[in-house]
């Protein structure tokens, strides 16, 4: 079995999840947060910790750690490998909580960087512009929506297409949710659960309380599996 691009992406950016038990009574439904993401076969695990206000504090995956800091409309993340600096991201978010700009610095002086600027129509991402410290030509991606779901992203001659489970609302553990959760900021807020991207099919299993318990991606004869663990609070 191969580990596909999605799993590699998550592990590179630090994701591991463990499931915690939930208590609930007849009057209140618990609010559950993902605390661990476990890929199978069990290669590595991402552990997630939170601040008292519910914001992400830290992600840990083996020797890799991402630390989150918040100030007004700015989120700053630090990626370390065995306490050695790897990169710093400075993210500016709008009133809706969506990122309008992300600058990633790949050295401590900030001399080497790349920047992503995001443009919206309401809450729908319509354009991304990537620039680099090397002064190369900006890379522009246009995003197309239908029924409040992102259906395609076009960069030059490359197109990434998405389809959705229109009977299932987007929730924690969704494919796009997890990709953005690990990168530390959100730009895509689709209405429904992602069913496929290009030729990769995504299926979900659910817990009795409706939370996603696992995600599986299928591409050709290859598949990858993520198991989610939660901590729930009343």
Image: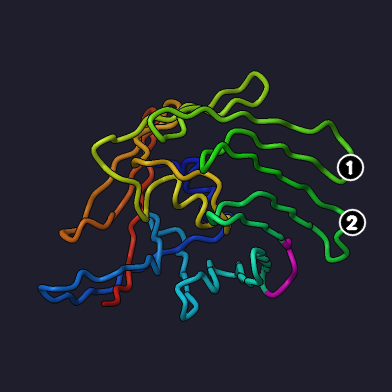
Residue 96, given in percent of the width and then of the height, sits at 53, 54
Picture quadrant of residue 42: bottom left
In the current view of this chain or complex, which residue is farthest to the top? 157
Could you tell whether 93 is left or right of 182 in the image?
A: right
Dot label at residue 134: 1
Where residue 159 appears, x then y in whole percent? Answer: 56, 23
* Quarter containing the N terminus: top left
Q: Which residues, given as a range, are shown in magenta?
A: 83-88
Residue 158 lies in what quarter of the image? top right
Mark 2 = which residue? 111
Q: Is residue 28 left or right of residue 101?
A: left
Question: Closer to the camera, 99 or 4?
Answer: 99
37 over 192 or under it: above or below:
below
Where residue 167 sits: x, y (%)? 23, 38
- Binning the other alpha carbons within 10 Å of mark 2 as few (below 14), some (14 to 19) or many (20 upward) gives few
User: Residue 135 at x, y = what percent?
Assistant: 89, 39
Dot 1: element = loop
Q: Considering the numbered disc 2 on the image, is that residue within a helix, a strand or a loop?
A: loop
Q: Main secondary structure of the magenta part?
A: strand
Please identify the quarter of the rendering in which residue 232 is found. Answer: bottom left
Residue furthest to the bottom in view is 52
Classify 10 Å Cα crowding around label 1: few (below 14), some (14-19), many (20 and above): few
Vertical relation: 67 (above or below) 127: below
Distance from Cα at disc 1 to Cα at disc 2: 10 Å
Question: For this rendering, which residue is in front, 67 or 223?
Answer: 67
């Amino acid at each position: 079995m191969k580990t596909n691009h999605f799993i590699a992406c998550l592990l590179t950016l630090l994701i591991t999840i463990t499931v915690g038990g939930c208590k609930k009574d007849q009057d209140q439904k618990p609010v559950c947060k993902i605390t661990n993401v476990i890929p199978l076969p069990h290669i590595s695990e991402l552990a997630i910790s939170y601040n008292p206000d519910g914001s992400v504090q830290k992600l840990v995956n083996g020797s890799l750690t991402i630390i989150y800091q918040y100030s007004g409309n700015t989120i700053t993340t630090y990626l370390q490998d065995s306490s050695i600096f790897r990169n710093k991201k400075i993210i500016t978010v709008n009133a809706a909580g969506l990122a309008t700009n992300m600058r990633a610095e790949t050295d401590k002086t900030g001399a080497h960087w790349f920047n992503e600027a995001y443009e919206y129509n309401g809450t729908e991402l319509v354009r991304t512009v990537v620039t680099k410290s090397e002064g190369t030509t900006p890379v522009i991606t246009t995003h197309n929506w239908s029924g409040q779901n992102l259906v395609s992203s076009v960069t030059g001659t490359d197109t990434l297409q998405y389809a959705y489970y229109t009977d299932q609302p987007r929730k924690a553990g969704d494919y796009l949710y997890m990709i953005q959760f690990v990168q530390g900021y959100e730009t895509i807020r689709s209405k429904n659960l992602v069913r496929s991207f290009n030729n990769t099919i995504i299926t979900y299993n659910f817990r009795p309380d409706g939370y996603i318990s696992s995600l599986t991606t299928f591409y050709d004869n290859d598949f990858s599996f993520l198991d989610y663990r939660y901590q729930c609070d009343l």
